[in-house]
Image: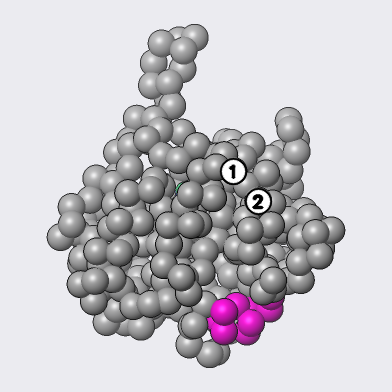
Amino acid sequence: MEKLIVTAALTGAQQGKAANPNIPEQPEEIVQQAIECRQAGAAIVHIHARDKDGRPTADVEVFRRIFEPLKEKTDLVICLSTGGARTLPLQQRVAMIPAFKPDLASYNIGSAMQGIYDFKNKRWIVDFTMAQSFADLEFIGRTMLENGTKPELEIYDWGMINNALLFRNMGVLKEPLHFSFVMGMPGQTTSATPKNLLHLVESIPSGSTFQVMGIGQHQFPMVTMGMLMGGHIRVGLEDNLYIERGKLAQSNAQLVEKAIHIARELGREIATPQEARKFLSLRQA
Ligand code: KMH
Ligand code: ZN
């Protein structure tokens, strides 16, 4: 099997320090944890930005305080999230693409209902719909195409693969495609089962690459399945706050170390950032 590309998703847009004080929010914290993840063996960092109060932001100047030091201090492949500040107008949400022309950026290629219901108190804890039209999706895709940024296609449910194939046929997406399977997110998404993952993997065009992530307690079971199926993986505090049941992770690097330990036990070698660039057909650094 090809060497394993490990992505560290450091911050996300949903949880904050109240959930785990080790989530990096400010640029300096994000840069520091990214460096630690590189030392632990991650090849890619998936980056969200927060404002000074910890709220998701798409402010280019905040992204700059993360992107530029990472470029200067590391050889990491940088994947910027376009899905962080989801309530902002689309133009602002993707402004970091023309500003930095990152190697990779997240591309949520459809709509998704995210919901968590508190049965005890009979109320919704999470009730959020990421609603995007086809015209929105085309705009995001063309922005990445024009700036030489490869999309990391976030697949929350199977139908999003259909959207990816449509945009490929329209010339908005160029092969080889890179898919990112989101498993076990509460809501109208894909539950974290081996059967579902197999179906997703078998549905993408040959020659594509894919990574697997699992949300919450699904993180390590799902990334292990991804490794066994020859895919790449993503771990990090964006997706999961715990290193083991009931024990908060101390850092993103701790989650990366655990994933790499599993990979090595399974005989899968780890890709460097340079190798990741080659496997994903990215620009060479
Ligand atoms: N939060 C993940 C489930 C993005 O950043 O645009 C998917 C994600 C999307 O990382
Ligand atoms: Zn993200």
Residue 247, compared with residue 44, is above or below; it is above
Q: Please tell me which residue is depicted at 62% across the width and 47% down the height of the picture.
A: 222
Residue 283, compared with residue 96, is above or below; it is below
Camera sees residue 275: yes
Q: Is residue 73 magenta?
A: no
Asked whether, in this view, residue 136 is left or right of residue 230, the answer is: left
Q: Please tell me which residue is depicted at 81% across the width and 65% down the height of the picture.
A: 267
Q: Residue furthest bottom?
A: 284
Magenta stretch: dominant SS? helix
Q: Quadrant of residue 63?
A: bottom left
Is 279 or 40 nearer to us in this picture?
Answer: 279
Q: Position of residue 77 (x, y in %)?
A: 55, 76
Q: Position of residue 238 (x, y in %)?
A: 55, 49
Q: Which residues are magenta?
A: 271-279
Is 94 or 143 nearer to us in this picture?
Answer: 143
Asked whether, in this view, residue 151 is left or right of residue 17, the answer is: left
Amino acid type of the residue tagged 2 in the rendering: Met
Asked whether, in this view, residue 14 is left or right of residue 82, the answer is: right
Q: Residue furthest left?
A: 135
Are circles 2 and 1 on residues that touch, CB within 8 Å? Answer: yes
Q: Which mark is residue 225?
A: 2
Q: Position of residue 93 (x, y in %)?
A: 29, 61
Q: Position of residue 160 (x, y in %)?
A: 33, 53
